[in-house]
Image (cartoon, rainbow, N blue to C red):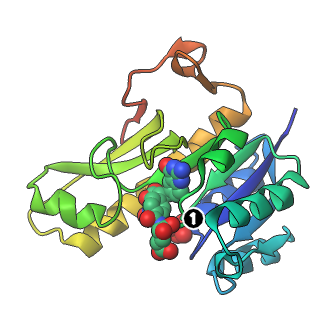
Amino acid sequence: MSKRIVVLISGSGSNLQAIMDAIDASQINGRIEAVLSNKADAFGLERARKANIPALILKHTEFESREAFDQAMIAKIDEYKPDLIVLAGFMRILTPEFVRHYEGRMFNIHPSLLPKYKGLHTHQRALESGDLEHGCTVHFVTEELDGGPLAVQGKVSIDMDDDADSLQQKVHKVEHRIYPLAVEWFCADKLQWTPEGVKFDNTLLPASGYQLESGE
Ligand code: NHR
Ligand code: GAR
């Protein structure tokens, strides 16, 4: 059965685009039912409209608390009966209630090789630590910020002449490969969150998740 997907964004939505492209190419057995942004001017909303996907706006500034905002999001999102929630550059921390409501069926992509560099400014921090590699991670979302079980990781090398900008560009390219892949595998019931950990083809993955090889 084709899966129903709702994507949450705050910005440009290039990861959203990569997932839409993979759906158009029939790589993913799923459909984006709606795109929801907490910012009215997010460019990702344009991408959704262009693809005739409902583009919803819910401004967090118009709610008196995080709880109220998240409740309103749940109400809107659930109209679309999603099997999977995809955070794609969504920048509001989610309440435990929201996270529990979508437990095991919500992904985020984070621009670091988690568990390294949770939070912000990940590229700068990787450079300052003198790391030789960096990358991005798709993980299941839990209450712990950037701390949920890892699903898929993709690496890039850090070269002598890299700065935060060049590194961000390299990481973005890999994001656009691993995020559609993670969604593809979830929709095919290949990738699952279970109480024992994340499983791929019914086999427990290591804590670092599925490692995408550069040629893959
Ligand atoms: N919520 C929970 N509960 N768990 C996670 O793992 C989450 C989450 C919400 C968003 C994405 C995340 C990232 O990949 C994400 C993961 C925003 C912030 C943040 O501090 C932190 C982590 C992430 C996204 N947001 C500020 C806030 O007060 C606002 C910043 C802004 O508006 O620009 O919500 O890094
Ligand atoms: C991505 O690089 C993603 O990893 C990052 O925001 C970008 C969104 O790009 N997420 C975070 O930093 C979360 N704190 P996009 O809007 O073009 O998909």
Image point (72%, 42%), residue name? 101
103 vs 31, nearest the viewer: 103
Question: Where is residue 182 drawn, in percent x and y?
Answer: 58, 40
Question: Where is residue 148 drawn, in percent x and y?
Answer: 47, 38
The residue at label 1 has a CB less than 8 Å from ligand 1: yes
Q: Residue furthest front?
A: 64
Q: Residue furthest right?
A: 79
Residue 183 visible in the shown view: yes
Question: Where is residue 122 drawn, in percent x and y?
Answer: 29, 61
Res 205 → quadrant: top left
The residue to which callout 1 is attached is 90
Residue 33 visible in the shown view: no
Res 206 → quadrant: top left
Question: Where is residue 159 drawn, in percent x and y?
Answer: 14, 59
Image point (36%, 42%), residue name? 214
- Amino acid bearing label 1: Phe
Q: Quadrant of the N terminus?
A: top right
55 vs 67, nearest the viewer: 67
128 vs 15, nearest the viewer: 128
